Amino acid sequence: MATSKRGIFENPTKSPWNFEVYDSELEYRMMVKLEQDHAVLKWMKRHGISIPWIDGQKHQRRYVPDFLVEYTDGRIALIEVKDPSRFDSDEVKRKRTAAELWCKQRGMEYIIATVR
């Protein structure tokens, strides 16, 4: 699957913006899924969240999760969309650890997902 497809998702009904930019086919597919999911109240890609994490060389970096989602039951989650082949990479594991802690401190969920 080509994952580098970029584009504009126009006129989403559950985002506060009149368009959202996707950086991959997986992100586009997640946008479609979020729009169709009746349990999703709101979502956005342009959310401004940046989470600090430490890379393998012990350098501090910043990580911007793909989506901020609010569900109809009040739950709030950060969703990162990844190809399953990348779930176990060192970088993804480090970002996930940092994001899970960040979310836990704020009463949120962190989800790594893939979309077929």
Image: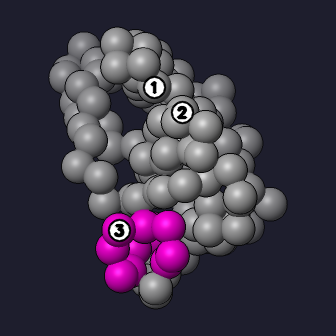
- Horizontal placement of 46 versus 29: left or right? left
Q: Main secondary structure of the magenta part?
A: loop
Quarter of the image that includes the N terminus: bottom right
Comes first in the chain, label 2 or label 1:
2
Q: Which residue is mark 1?
A: 108
Residue 90 rendering spot, x and y as whole percentages: 51, 23
Residue 102 rendering spot, x and y as whole percentages: 35, 19
Q: Secondary structure at mark 3?
A: loop
Alpha carbon distance from label 3 to label 2: 18 Å
Q: Amino acid at mark 1?
A: Met
Comes first in the chain, label 3 or label 2:
3
Give the crowd class for mark 3: few <14, some 14-19, many >=20 residues within 10 Å. Answer: few
- Is residue 1 positioned above or below 43 on the image? below
Q: Which residues are magenta?
A: 12-23
Q: Amino acid at mark 2?
A: Arg
Q: Which residue is mark 3?
A: 16
Which residue reaches farthest front? 73
Q: Are marks 2 and 1 in contact (CB under 8 Å)?
A: yes
Residue 34 rendering spot, x and y as whole percentages: 62, 61
Residue at 32% x, 44% y is: 64
